[in-house]
Amino acid sequence: MSDGRTDVGDDSLRAVFYLHWIVLVRPVMMLLFAAAGMAIAWIVGAMLLGPGGTAGLLLPASLATAGLLVILSGPALQATVRRETTTVEVFDDHIVLTTGLFQKLQRSVRASEIVGVDLFQDFSQRLLGCGNLRIDTRGVDSIVVADLEQAETAKRICQQAVVDARPDRFAGR
């Protein structure tokens, strides 16, 4: 998907956007550092105990290490589920944020109620082409999507949907 557009049968659907793979970096790095730390602890422990001292500790230490890896893999699994289940769909007259696997959250905002579409990017997000999209409405609600793929394209398409939904407001521009 180069520009976020899809060929879905719904004529009013303009684009669908997903989360960037960058959401997986922090939890996977945490898991890798924890695994490296555990490997170093195993090596140092084996060196300190000597060749005959590790036989009685091998099973409990293996179970503890496996348990820690399972616990530490939780954030990586959570980030993967978040990435795979979060979408931003831009229609002609509204924008829908859908997220969740077991408990689904669907937030819909009419394009005519949107007062601002903002994009925030740090340096790494600019390099990777993603960003944090914030859609403000007339009320107190706003939709914030962190680490959205093709964020600049998403911002532009959302802004165009707002202009198309409220032609009277933007007629003079």
Image (cartoon, rainbow, N blue to C red):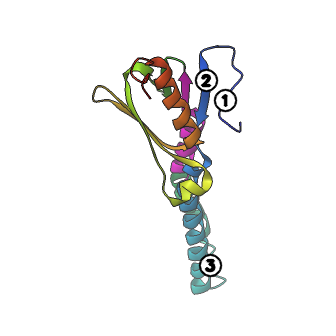
User: Mark 2 or 3, which is nearer the eye?
Assistant: 2
Query: How dense is the environment of label 2, judged by Cα within 10 Å: few (below 14), some, or many (20 and up)?
Result: many
Under circle 3, the secondary element is helix
Instruction: Return the disc, 1 or 2, that comes first in the chain's sequence.
Output: 1
At label 3, the amino acid type is Ile
User: In the image, which disc is placed on residue 43?
Assistant: 3
165 within the magenta span: no
In terms of depth relative to the viewer, which is nearer, 105 or 101? Answer: 105
Q: Residue at x 54, y 65 (%)?
A: 34
User: In the image, which disc is placed on residue 5?
Assistant: 1
Residue 22 coordinates in the image, percent (x, y): 58, 51
Camera sees residue 61: no
- Residue that carries the numbered disc 2 in the rendered image: 14
Residues in magenta? Answer: 73-91
Q: What whole-number distance in Å separates the C-alpha atoms at marks 3 and 1?
A: 51 Å
User: Mark 3 or 1, which is nearer the eye?
Assistant: 1
Total numbered circles:
3
